[in-house]
């Protein structure tokens, strides 16, 4: 079974999903989480189980209690701070009843919001209250607003979802639509330089595959691209010319052991043609994810029999790296030491 990594940041929601004064429930890492935005505009994430009698807080409302932003449970009206999870009020108490509300706390997940995305930190200790380490840096810089977001839920555990996402050999078979990779394209030798990066690796900046029609149309000649991966499941791809920039950021988030949310956030600037093509790009992006999703479903019919799987060089090296990084992350936590990236710079070759 795939082990879920903790003490890391995960995707929670897009900024647009969090409306002021509203909240909703989402399963993340096997936990029900209520995600919302309080009246001050601050995003929040709490365990969506009232510590009193287990009713989902997401069914309640966002309200103010003595100057603090709180979530009110719909069952008996207990109120919990949106930013600290501490109980601020137990309405039924009368004088002389000794319960101290502030000693009751619902798990709070630290959040970080930037570039239209809200991340949440999942500590290994559910009672941890220390400040989390800084959130991951993707290099979005001036790309503050996503142009569009596509989301799917795959019936796959996190490991199979990540491995499927980074697998270069499936592209000519699964994504062979005429405008991207027509079957007539034929396969070419790919040779790419991989370098270690923070908690992951990157394919060094290079010219995109000459057999990708779409890039040629959209950007003309002088294009370079760079693809990066970071634990626990972040992948980003930058395509740029001296003038324009296209940035696709993909988040994989475990809902539970059998289900993984995939969220693809796309940004660009100074690419007029992309603005014009946006109504086509959105369904095209959805089709890409659906193609992967159908393959996941098909794979599940085989995985039901718990077969062993084969990893071959060089095409599955990235999958092996991912598992290696995971092991090192777990070990470094256990041994309370810094994470040491086990990946060495490597050139990988394959036909695709
Ligand atoms: S169940 Fe939440 S206040 Fe009672
Ligand atoms: Fe794919």
Image: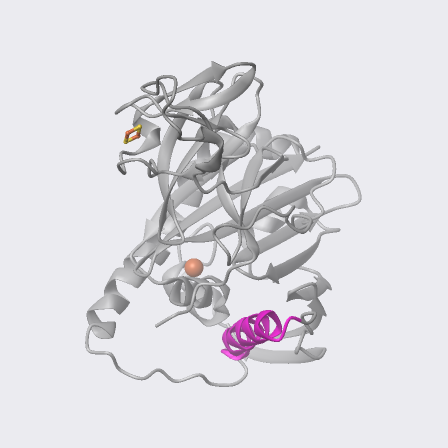
In the image, 196 versus 81, the foreground residue is 81
What residue do we see at 68% from left, 46% from top?
A: 220
Query: How far across and how far down the image is residue 293, in percent?
Result: 32, 55
What residue do we see at 20% from left, 72% from top?
A: 304
- Horizontally, residue 287 falls left or right of residue 298, namely right
Residue 329 vertical placement versus 98 (above, below): below
In the image, 245 versus 209, the foreground residue is 245
- Horizontally, residue 201 falls left or right of residue 314, namely right
The answer to which image quadrant residue 25 occupies is top left
What residue do we see at 30% from left, 26% from top?
A: 59
Q: Looking at the magenta stretch, what is its main secondary structure?
A: helix
Is-magenta flag for residue 213? no
**What is the count of numbered marks?**
0
The answer to which image quadrant residue 333 occupies is bottom right
| Ligand 1 falls in quadrant | top left
Query: How far across and how far down the image is residue 73, in percent?
Result: 33, 25
Query: How far across and how far down the image is residue 295, in percent?
Result: 31, 62
- Horizontally, residue 331 falls left or right of residue 175, namely right
In the image, 146 versus 171, the foreground residue is 146
User: Where are the magenta residues, as a range?
Assistant: 315-336
Query: How far across and how far down the image is residue 165, in percent?
Result: 46, 61
What colour scheme does the image use? one colour
Residue 168 vertical placement versus 37 (above, below): below
Residue 250 vertical placement versus 75 (above, below): below
Q: Split into 4 quadrants, where in the image is the N terminus?
A: bottom left
Is-magenta flag for residue 319? yes
């Amino acid at each position: 079974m795939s082990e879920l990594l903790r003490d890391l940041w995960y995707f929670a929601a897009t900024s647009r999903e969090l409306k002021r004064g509203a909240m909703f429930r989402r399963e993340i890492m096997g936990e029900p989480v209520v995600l919302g935005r309080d009246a001050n505009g601050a995003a929040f994430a709490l365990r969506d189980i009232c510590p009193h009698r287990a009713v989902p807080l997401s069914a309640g409302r966002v309200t103010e209690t003595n100057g603090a932003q709180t979530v009110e449970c719909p069952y008996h009206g207990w109120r919990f701070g949106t930013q600290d999870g501490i109980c601020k009020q137990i309405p039924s108490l009368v004088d002389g009843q000794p319960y101290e509300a502030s000693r009751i706390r619902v798990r709070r997940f630290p959040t970080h919001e930037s570039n239209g995305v809200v991340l949440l930190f999942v500590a290994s200790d559910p009672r941890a209250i220390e400040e989390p380490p800084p959130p991951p840096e993707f290099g979005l810089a001036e790309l503050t607003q996503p142009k569009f977001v596509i989301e799917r839920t795959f019936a796959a555990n996190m490991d199979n979802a990540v491995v499927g996402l980074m697998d270069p050999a499936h592209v000519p078979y699964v994504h062979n639509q005429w405008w991207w990779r027509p079957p007539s394209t034929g396969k070419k030798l790919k040779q790419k330089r991989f370098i270690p990066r923070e908690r992951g690796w990157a394919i060094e900046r290079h010219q995109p595959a000459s057999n990708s029609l779409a890039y040629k149309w959209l950007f003309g000649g002088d294009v370079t691209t760079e693809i990066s991966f970071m634990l626990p499941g972040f992948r980003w791809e930058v395509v740029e010319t001296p003038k324009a920039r296209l940035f696709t950021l993909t988040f994989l988030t475990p809902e539970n052991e059998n289900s993984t949310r995939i969220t693809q956030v796309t940004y660009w600037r100074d690419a007029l043609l992309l603005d014009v093509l946006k109504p086509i790009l959105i369904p095209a992006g959805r089709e890409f994810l659906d193609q992967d999703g159908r393959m996941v479903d098909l794979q599940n019919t085989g995985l039901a029999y718990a077969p062993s799987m084969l990893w071959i060089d060089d095409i599955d090296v990235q999958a092996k790296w991912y598992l290696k990084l995971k092991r090192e992350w777990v070990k470094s936590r256990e041994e309370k030491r810094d994470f040491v990236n086990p990946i060495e710079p490597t050139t990988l070759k394959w036909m695709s």
